[in-house]
Amino acid sequence: MIELRNVCKSYNKGLLRAVDDLTLAVPPGEIFGFLGPNGAGKTTTIKMIVGILAPDSGSIAIEGRDNRSEPLACKAVTAFVPDEPEIYERLTGLEYLNFIGDVYGVPAGLRAERAGRWLDKFELSAVAGDPIQTYSHGMRQKIVLSGALLVEPKVFVLDEPLTGLDPRSAHHLKEAMRGHCDRGGTLFFSTHVMEVAEKFCDRIAIIHKGRLIACGSLDELRRQAGESQSLENIFLELTEP
Amino acid sequence: MKRLKALLAAGLRQNFGLSLLKHKVLQGKKDLWLVLLAGIGFLSLLPVLVLYVRGLGLLFGILRAAGQETAMLTLAILVGQFFILVFGLFYVLSAFYFSRDLEFLVSLPARPFEVIGAKFGVILVNEYLTVLFVVVPVFVVYGVMAGKPLGYWPLAALVFLLLPVIPLALAGLLVMAMMRCVNVSRKKDFLILVGSLALLAAALFLQLGLAGTRSPEELVKFFSAADGLARLLGEKFPPCIWASRLLASGFSAPGLGYLALFAGGSVAVLLLLLLAAEKLFYRGLIGLSEMAVRRKKLSAAALASSFASGRTAWRAILRREWKLMNRTPIFLLNGILSVVLVPVMLFIMVRTSAGSSSMAILKILGSGNRLAEILFAAAFFVACGCLNGTASSTFSREGKTFWISKVIPVAPGRQVTGKFLHSYLIAGLGVLGGLLAVRLALGLGWKSILPAALLAFVAGVLLTATNMAVDLARPLLTWTNPMRAIKQNLNVVIAMAVDAGILYGFYHVSRLLRRVGFAGTGLIAVLFVILSLLAAASIFLLARFADKRYTTIET
Ligand SMILES: Nc1ncnc2c1ncn2[C@@H]1O[C@H](COP(=O)(O)OP(=O)(O)OP(=O)(O)O)[C@@H](O)[C@H]1O
Ligand SMILES: [Mg+2]
């Protein structure tokens, strides 16, 4: 469960409002997609949820705990994957996963089993012993995802996780996320791919210029827009400049 | 030429304009206490400057009596060029080969010599800052005391401007040649490390080993000539002699001749560098990031065993710091290696003839005063351990990966424990290195070394924590060239100034203690207690500061 209440965030000393009075609840058990044009404030919102940025005002709760007064409790149940896989290049994939396992306190036995599974699915087993420096962009993304999946947290927060993944890896990831939500977990992710949002998400939020302009199931959005349009048309209509 | 100018302008802007501005302005009021601390640190350096100038005045008097005053210029220029050569090796290696803008630069329609020319220009400007404090006071003291005419000053400025060109271009040539050779192998990181150490050793040897031993008759011969001492000092590196004679003779026929030699030599070496860039640069650069990889599927058993242990968070962080530092050549050179290097340099220096005689003088001065011996040794150990960039770049080094530190469920205070242990480990190695050097090179007795080491280990805690606090207050996380995170990081300089200030403060504390009647073991014990209290407080405050500060660092 993620709850944002009246969250605001501006850059450049208030000159640029990136997120404007955002109130949003991401219930557990539902795949929640976050859409919006470039620069709408998706990444900013996500970074506030995981504690990289602090909101100017408003509050954010994860699993019912405020992420500023109880940051460690929130971080312990959250795994985050950023849009750019900037990680320790000089470590090997295995060392990185071990580091993540250590700091999240994943027991060694579970770690080997989960890491083995994901390295296999993402076809990284052969390179896991090499420095991350030698990985391609997609491989880096997959090692960050593996780290997040290693933790098996209650809450996943993913910034454009499907961009740059090959079809097979994307398929495995979607399957895993479906399973995670079916078990009652929470998933919040941003995407630019309308088909993914349409077919994969149970609930969709659209943000535009920092403001939430639509939120609900696909059917609810259709009703709100008036006709039985595709999500793409709804999106284009709502975010018209 | 137009492209070269554009590249140079872009490089300078990136290196100085933007980043400095960011450092200064963006961090606003929170920096105030730091500015204050740094101010105190720099102020504490002021007496050093005054001492330096006074010492130069004395030296001038002595040299003039022997008719050897130009030796002063030669010495200053030699030392300046030596520093530039040694540091230049690092700068050049990092800027030419490890900067992340290279991929972009190489893709531009610019020739190799233009890329290298622009990068060279940026380093050159950096070097002026390095030599400013060493060379300019000498030029001024000499000019004033020798009563040089007005014409001396523009020439001095010219020499100052040309001074770094030859050694820096030499460093560039050496590094490019090395990289060309190294780039054929798969074990590049390792070879680069070995190669740069070899170059460094060569540079050190050239400067320190050259004194050699000479018969007294030879020495007398040198001294009887008008600028014999200058010639003796600079004989292995003629440009120093040209420059100092140029300054000594001013606008006269021989002076202009030396001007032609010095300026012509600088231009020639620079041209050589650009020419070599065309031949060597890309072949050393392309494929550099290619690394030896295994690409062997891990068996389930191997995988399980690599995950066998579960560590506590601070140990995981300590391991991460250790690995990241040691596997990034630039960081390694500035961390452990610089810590090892200082004692080695001292050792070599003492073994040269000039060194051993000055050491003998030092020993005579120090003998009989055990307390002074202990305190000086302690200060030296601390310098060996703490005057490197490890602690003062510990947050900056994380760079764009800092988001990981912000999202992991480990309290910043605890993360900092792991980071502190890493920095302190290196400081401890430095103290041990200094200890060995003092023991082996100077033969200092254990009765002085042990209490000094005790003091140094405790002071190391205080300085390490302070250095980390400086970096935590204003971490530089946006770098693309790892050099920016450590060697060209303003935090490292500020931290060193603050360290110097703290040591200076303790110098006064010990004087005060003496004045109120403490002596010998009693004084050491009191110092130890004060240091211990401060050390404990500094660690506690650092953790608290981290808990506060981590939430406000936005990436
Ligand atoms: N570090 C920053 N400093 C200043 N402004 C920023 C910063 N990061 C983002 N912004 C601005 O905040 C706004 C929102 O950016 P954000 O990255 O959240 O968009 P986004 O929805 O993730 O876009 P995209 O789809 O391109 O990833 C943009 O106008 C952007 O220019
Ligand atoms: Mg984004």
Image (cartoon, coloured by chain):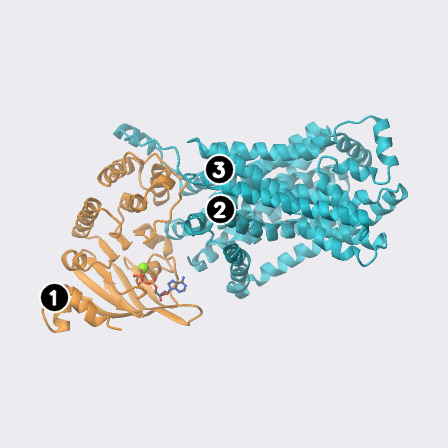
Chain colours: A orange, B cyan
The residue depicted at 54 percent of the width and 60 percent of the height is B17
Residue picked out by circle 1: A219
Q: Position of residue A7 (x, y in %)?
A: 33, 68
The C terminus of chain B: image quadrant: bottom left
Q: Helix or strand or loop: what does disc 3 sit on?
A: helix
Q: Position of residue A180 (x, y in %)?
A: 20, 49
| Amino acid type shown at disc 2 | Pro
Q: Is residue B57 above or below residue A211?
A: above
| Residue B460 can be seen in this image | no
- Compared across the picture, whether B183 is left or right of B233 comes to left
Q: Compute the Cα span from label 1 to label 3.
A: 55 Å
Callout 1: SS: helix
Q: Chain of mark 3?
A: B
Mark 1: few/some/many CA within 10 Å (<14, 14-19, 20+): some
Q: CA distance from mark 1 to mark 2?
A: 59 Å
Is B96 situated left or right of A83 in this image? Answer: right
Classify 10 Å Cα crowding around label 2: few (below 14), some (14-19), many (20 and above). many
User: Identity of the amino acid at label 3?
Assistant: Asn
Q: Earlier in the sequence, mark 3 or mark 2?
A: 2
The chain holding disc 2 is: B
User: Label 2: which residue?
Assistant: B112
Residues flagged by tags 1 and 3 on a common chain:
no
Establish whether ligand 1 lies closer than 8 Å to the Cβ of label 2. Answer: no
Please give the residue where the numbered disc 3 appears in the rendered image: B326
- Quarter residue B390 falls in: top right
Image coordinates of residue A70 in percent, x first then y, are 37, 57
Quarter of the image where ligand 1 sits: bottom left
In the image, residue B298 sits, relative to residue B176, either above or below, namely above
In the image, is A72 to the left or to the right of B476? Answer: left
Badge nearest the viewer, 3 or 2: 2
